[in-house]
Amino acid sequence: MMQTFNQATRDRRVLAPVWFCLTLLLSVGCQPSPTEPGDGQENQQQGAKRSDADSKLATPTSTTTDPKTTKEAALIPRSVLFGNPQKASARVSPNGKWLSYLAPVDGFLNVWVAPIDDFASAKPITKDTQRDIRGHSWAYTGEHILYTQDKDGDENWHVYATNVATGETKDLTPVDGVHARIEGTSQKFPNEILVGLNDRNAQLHDVYRVNIETGERELIQENEGVLGYVTDDDFNVRFAMSFTPTGGQLLLKNVQDEDGEADWEPFMEVGPEDAMTTGPAGFDKTSKILYLQDSRDRDTGALFSVDLESGEKKLIAENAKADVGEVIVHPTEKTIQAVGFTYSRREWEILDEAIKPDLEYLETVEDGELIITSRTLDDSKWTVAYILDDGPLKFYLYDRKNREAHFLFSSRDDLDQYELEKMHTPVIEARDGLKLVSYLTLPPGSDPDGDGVPEKAVPLVLDVHGGPWARDDWGFNSSHQWLANRGYAVLSVNYRGSTGFGKAFTNAANGEWSRKMHDDLIDTVNWAVEGGIAIEDKIAIMGGSYGGYATLVGLTYTPETFACGVDIVGPSSLVTLMENVPPYWAMFMPVMKIRVGDVSTEEGKQELLARSPLTKVDAIKRPLLIGQGANDPRVTQVEADQIVEAMQAKNIPVTYVLYPDEGHGFSDEANRMSFNAVTEAFLAEHLGGRVEPVGEDFEGASLYVPVGAGDVEGVKEALPEERLTMPPKEEAKE
């Protein structure tokens, strides 16, 4: 079973070490909204304009650039940029019978299905009325949709299966207060899946074999104290993965004893320096060949195959500047056909000549980067998407036999009427010589020659990604387009610790929260000012999760640098962050110890406090906006409450927006819209950009603004009195 990872709502197949697929769930990364096909970086595509969603035969297009006008660009409504997509995530069923996608039903994203030859007759088959469904996949039956859902952002995920014919949805993990995840699927067992469930021990996920039609489940592996397991297409548990006390990685091989019971012997131990860039990535068709990402004795993680009988190890693909990223895998043979590497932009290395003509044809259909989102088992039909920086994602159904691509839909065709901006890809040098891959979007009309430098400096927003073990990418980014449209340059930087750039770059962040990681952000700001891009006293910092922490660091450790800051679900104290982690983070804590700090000793706590914005509240001189979800299991409400209280005690102004039905990020469309309305008014007041009035953007939202509502124009006036206090504990939706 080839292990691939679909990052949140991103429509691309990503080859990642299996351990990383698990631990990414544990990282402090900000969850993207369902409007976005990527984790904060919206890779979408520009091309021929179509007004309907009917399937049409595509013809090759040539690249053209529309001339920029000198008149002021129209204000793009927040509803267009941040509302739920009209359609998203096209998938073809393994049997080639159905097409599926996500689209709203009564305001919430649900799964729609249509016969492959009658796309216009699509109907919704799920009926979620409380929360958007943010991703889905087909079971190998070809007649069932699989998806996961939590309650109000608590990340206690349930796994659901919906029968396409009957519309019946079955909760496969009907246990409250536990964290379920799909561990594996196999065409050999189309009616079953493997599910990880921490119902026995909140810290550990056991592996169950679950029938998707009846819901019956059988325990096949009780977790004996490891992070997780690697299974094959026969649903055999082949390896166990864990971290050593020093933050390294230990891989144990399952060898059965005389009674047929599982016994474990060491297979591979990786030091902490390679643990983030090395790990198993699945098997070939025979399950005798292990695919392995490995950075040992090198810097970047390359892709290897390991013969589990002979021990022979072969290099499959490598890149000197980037770790192995996306992968194209044959749906049944499980051979690796192409591998993607992303430094600034994605580059493909094609390994299987059989798909080369297909990829060459598909590159002519639309401008932008191509991704394959699904394939039938007979490999006759693909769904593909095109991504670009200045237009919405476009989905096609590709007929391999006739080599024809049929247009399905655009994620938001209402974007076509607005002027969208190109994204530049500067690589900025940090003070110690590290190369920081960055992404810059400029306001419309500010850069007539397109060289990435405006005619005159403009206000700038430094948008810091979460993780920190994640990365920013090139492509359509709703936040970039929004802020650029309002008159700001927007700059996102892959600071040290970001993933995908080799182990040295990732390891350079160890113990450097608020130190060299923040230096990278300051160096980026200085580059923008010195390069004539940014006005020095009109720079804001904002971000979610780690990006929220970076915002708080910016306003406390470098209080003169930024004009204001927007912190979304960011930790204010590294001590309380690490003392309040979800129980299933337990196996990951050795990594946190080496990369963040040691919360288990008094000396370690003092060191963490020295890098915590909460201890430097006195230094804050600039306006701060904080957004928090009350049910966040990773960065709990404590983090926001305590810094707001500390600022109030010092009579330092702050605006606090709290959502009782959200978690680590704002998933609900109305909540997302409302917070962006507050943010836009806040930035306009301190940077001077254009602003769309709050209008109806608070309708249906759960926001409370108990502190500082009067400090942001239009907020207090738009809220009833009861929303200007802390919400009652029972306010969360049932």
Image (cartoon, rainbow, N blue to C red):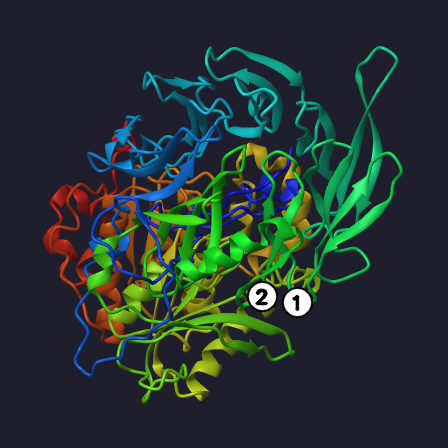
Measuring from the top left, give residue 651's x and y in whole percent: 30, 63
Measuring from the top left, give residue 543's x and y in whole percent: 41, 60
Measuring from the top left, give residue 171's x and y in whole percent: 42, 19
Labels in figure, total: 2
Location of residue 103 with respect to 326 vertically, above or below: above
Task: Tell which of 102 and 563 is nearer to you.
Answer: 102
Quadrant assignment, res 704: top left
Measuring from the top left, give residue 703's x and y in whole percent: 23, 45
| Badge 1: residue crowd in 10 Å (few <14, some 14–19, many ≥20) | some
| Three-letter code, disc 1 | Lys
Q: Residue at x 16, y 80 (%)?
A: 71
Residues at marks 1 and 2, CA–CA distance in whole angstroms = 6 Å
Q: Is residue 21 among what the camera can see?
A: yes
Q: Quadrant of the C terminus?
A: top left
| Badge 2: residue crowd in 10 Å (few <14, some 14–19, many ≥20) | some
Task: Tell which of 247 and 114 is nearer to you.
Answer: 114
Q: Which mark is residue 263?
A: none
Mark 2 and mark 1 in contact (Cβ < 8 Å)?
A: yes
Give the side of residue 670 with respect to residue 96, left or right: left
Task: Tell which of 141 and 619 is nearer to you.
Answer: 141
Location of residue 356 with respect to 445 vertically, above or below: above
**Residue placed under numbered mark 1 in the picture:** 321
Location of residue 112 with respect to 293 vertically, above or below: above
| Three-letter code, disc 2 | Tyr
Q: Residue at x 53, y 39 (%)?
A: 581
- N-term mark: 1 or 2: 1
Numbered disc 2: secondary structure? loop
**Residue placed under numbered mark 2 in the picture:** 343
Q: Residue at x 17, y 48 (%)?
A: 698
